[in-house]
Image (cartoon, grey):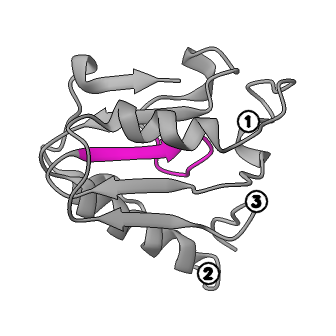
C-alpha cells in the first residue's frame, strides 16, 4: 500500500553550496548515465542510478523527475527531461520532510496527501529549471 519507489532513495542535504541549483544539477548530470528511450507513461518507473534529490539550505533543491512530489507533471514536458532544479530561499526542508514521509508511507495502509501542508508554498516559473 502507498507509494512504492522504483529504488532506494538517495538524498543529499547541504548547509552550503553554489549560488544556483543549476550548478548542482550540472554536477549530477555529468556523473549519471541515463537511458534515452523514456515515455511520459514510463517516466515514474525509471530507476535512478544516482542521487534522487539534493537540497541546499537557503539555495534551493534539485530532484530526479520521478519523485512522487513534483512541481511539473510528465505530461506537460518533454519526456527526455530527467532533472528539475528550483532556486528558492526556503522550502527545501519541507520538500525533504514530505519525501521522507512518503517514503515511509509505503509500509502502512495510509497515503499522505501533502497538499494541505503546503499552504501558500509556490514556485515561481522563473525559478524552475528543467534539464
Residue 104 visible:
yes
Q: On the rendered structure, is 85 left or right of 4?
A: left
Residue 35: x %, y % from top left: 84, 33
Upstream in sequence: badge 2 or badge 1 = 1
Local packing at callout 2 (Cα closer than 10 Å; few below 14, some 14-19, many 20+) is few
Q: Are marks 3 and 1 in contact (CB under 8 Å)?
A: no
Which residue in the structure is indicated by mark 2?
A: 109
Upstream in sequence: badge 3 or badge 1 = 3
Q: CA distance from mark 3 to mark 1?
A: 11 Å
The structure residue drawn at horizontal position 62% and vertical position 36%, both measured from the top left corner, is 30
Classify mark 2: helix, strand or loop: loop
The structure residue drawn at horizontal position 17% and vertical position 44%, both measured from the top left corner, is 121
Classify mark 3: helix, strand or loop: loop
Residue 112 visible:
no
Looking at the rendering, the stretch of residues picked out in magenta corresponds to 60-70
Residue 72: x %, y % from top left: 46, 29
Q: Which dot marks residue 6?
A: 3
Which residue is nearer to you in this view: 98 or 11? 11
Residue 26: x %, y % from top left: 49, 33
Q: Is residue 101 magenta?
A: no
Which residue is nearer to you in this view: 14 or 1? 14
Q: CA distance from mark 3 to mark 2?
A: 19 Å
Upstream in sequence: badge 3 or badge 2 = 3
Which residue in the structure is indicated by mark 1?
A: 43
Which residue is nearer to you in this view: 78 or 48? 48
Classify mark 1: helix, strand or loop: helix
- Residue 103: which quarter of the image? bottom right
Q: On the rendered structure, is 72 left or right of 106?
A: left
Q: Which dot marks residue 107?
A: none
Amino acid at each position: 500500500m502507498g507509494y512504492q519507489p522504483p529504488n532506494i532513495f538517495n538524498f543529499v542535504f547541504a548547509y552550503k553550496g553554489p549560488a544556483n541549483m543549476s550548478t548542482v544539477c550540472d554536477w549530477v548530470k555529468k556523473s549519471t548515465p541515463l537511458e534515452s528511450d523514456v515515455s511520459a507513461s514510463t517516466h515514474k518507473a525509471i530507476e535512478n542510478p544516482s542521487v534522487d534529490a539534493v537540497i541546499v539550505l537557503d539555495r534551493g533543491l534539485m530532484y530526479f523527475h520521478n519523485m512522487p512530489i513534483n512541481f511539473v507533471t510528465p505530461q506537460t514536458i518533454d519526456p527526455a527531461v530527467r532533472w528539475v532544479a528550483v532556486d528558492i530561499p526556503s522550502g527545501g526542508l519541507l520538500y525533504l520532510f514530505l519525501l521522507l514521509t512518503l517514503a515511509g508511507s509505503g509500509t502502512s495502509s495510509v497515503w499522505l496527501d501533502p497538499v494541505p501542508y503546503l499552504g501558500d508554498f509556490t514556485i515561481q516559473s522563473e525559478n524552475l529549471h528543467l534539464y
